[in-house]
Each structure stands twice: as C-alpha cells, then as structure tokens.
Amino acid sequence: MGLRIFETDPEAAPKQRQRFADDLVGRFRSGYSINNRPAALTEWRVTSGDPDVAAAINELYGGDRPQTWETKGEDNIEVFTKAAKVKVILDGPSAIRQEMVLWGRAGAIRRCDGVEQTGDDAKGRPCECPASFAERKEAGKRGTGCQPNITTFFRLADNPDLGRFKFTSGSWSLVKDIVATEAALASIDGPAEAWLRLEIVEYTSAGQLRKFTKPVIDVIGPVK
C-alpha cells in the first residue's frame, strides 16, 4: 500500500504523467559518511557481504575496486561505482514499500502511512504529523515529525542471476515521484524494467546557486 499523505493535502499531490528477505545480496546507496557526517554521491555506491557480488558490481559498473568499510551490518564490502544510473528489474508494485517514520536514537518512535499510525502499539490511530505536505517536510527536518522511508527491491537487468538488491531512501522528492512509478508498475502488472538513477538538481536560494542529488525510478516497460 502506498502512502496516504496527499489525502490530507491534495494540492501538493503530484500531477499524473503520460519481505525484506534474507536472499538480498547487496544494497545500493546514494551517499556515504565522512567523519560521521553524511555526504551525497552522484554515482551509485553498492555494499555487499559477498566478495563475488562486489567483484561483479565492479566489473559491471566500474569505479573503485571493492574495499571493506566499517559497519554494523553484514554488507561490509563497498564499491564506489562510475554509474549514475543502472537498469533494474522490478517485480511489480510490491517491489516498492513505503512508510513514514519518526526516528529516535534507539530506533523508530512512531510509524504511519500519512493518515493512520501503523506501529504495533498504535495501529489505526490518527497520524500525529501535520496535514500539509510542506508542514510534514518541515516537521521531519526538525525531527518532530515522520520522514519518508522508501525501500525498493530489484534485480539488475545486466545480470539478473546475481540476486536481489535493495535501495532505501528518505528523499521527499522521491515521495512525489514514486506515485507515478507505482502507477506505471500497476499498469504493467508484472516484472518491469526501470532506470534507477541519481539526478543532480540545481536551484537558486537567497541569490546563491545550490544543488542536491535526488534518486529517481523511471519505469521503462515490461521485461522483454
């Protein structure tokens, strides 16, 4: 089920356009950490606990050779690729899972779908976040409201037999874009090819040129 946050703020809704599982072999990441501070990337970083998978990623997408990195997870090998976009295979709308989460130091404090809470201890209760999209986003930045938590599961079109990967994002821009992505996947009703890419967005604020990188999932069509 998709997020329902646009039910409370229809004007902010995007316009229509013409089991987390143990078999995951790696994660695609759009950033990394420098001195415990997050930094965005313009090309994909892939992590895995399997040296053969890391080597295959390096062969497919170039970049730095696989290296170990410090992590509490099992995916302790990373590859900084040269690919800003990769063609992936999505197994229908169920390949994308969405929720809104208010994070605390010890983990999730509250979860919701934008209208109702989904956590076990408060399931069905009204969402405590602001109704408008802009206010939700501001509350998320302040750490007082839920933020997007979107996870996409996929295989690589260049090597489907390599296994399943996932990409998790808290991007607010992806929240809007994913509406069209899910609609496209629903219309195909089966495995679909898509581009998973990182797009550089430039804008002017207070007279200064600024930019950020946002993840995008562009559905191509049914798997041939």
Image (cartoon, rainbow, N blue to C red):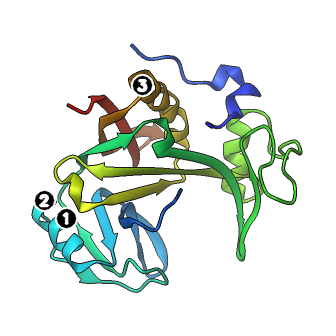
Q: Which residue is mark 1?
A: 57
How far apart, in angstroms, are the residues tagged by discs 3 and 2? 27 Å
Q: Secondary structure at mark 3?
A: helix
Q: Which residue is mark 2?
A: 60
Question: Residue 131, percent across and down?
Answer: 79, 34
In the shown orientation, is residue 28 left or right of residue 1?
Answer: left
Q: Which mark is residue 7?
A: none
User: Is residue 24 in view from this perspective?
Assistant: yes
Q: Secondary structure at mark 1?
A: helix
In the shown orientation, is residue 42 left or right of residue 16?
Answer: left
User: Is residue 201 in view from this perspective?
Assistant: no
How far apart, in angstroms, are the residues tagged by discs 1 and 2? 5 Å
Question: Residue 188, percent across and down?
Answer: 38, 24
Looking at the image, do the residues carrying marks 1 and 2 touch, with CB atoms under 8 Å apart? yes
Circle 3 residues within 10 Å: few <14, some 14–19, many ≥20? many
Q: In this picture, is 187 found above or below 34? A: above
Q: In this picture, is 76 found above or below 179? A: below
- Using the rendered view, name the quadrant where residue 200 is placed: top left
Determine the residue positioned at 50% across, 16% down. Answer: 16
Disc 1 residue type?
Ile
Question: Residue 56, percent across and down?
Answer: 16, 67
Q: Which residue is mark 3?
A: 184
In the shown orientation, is residue 130 left or right of residue 159?
Answer: right
Of residues 66 and 147, the one nearer the viewer is 66
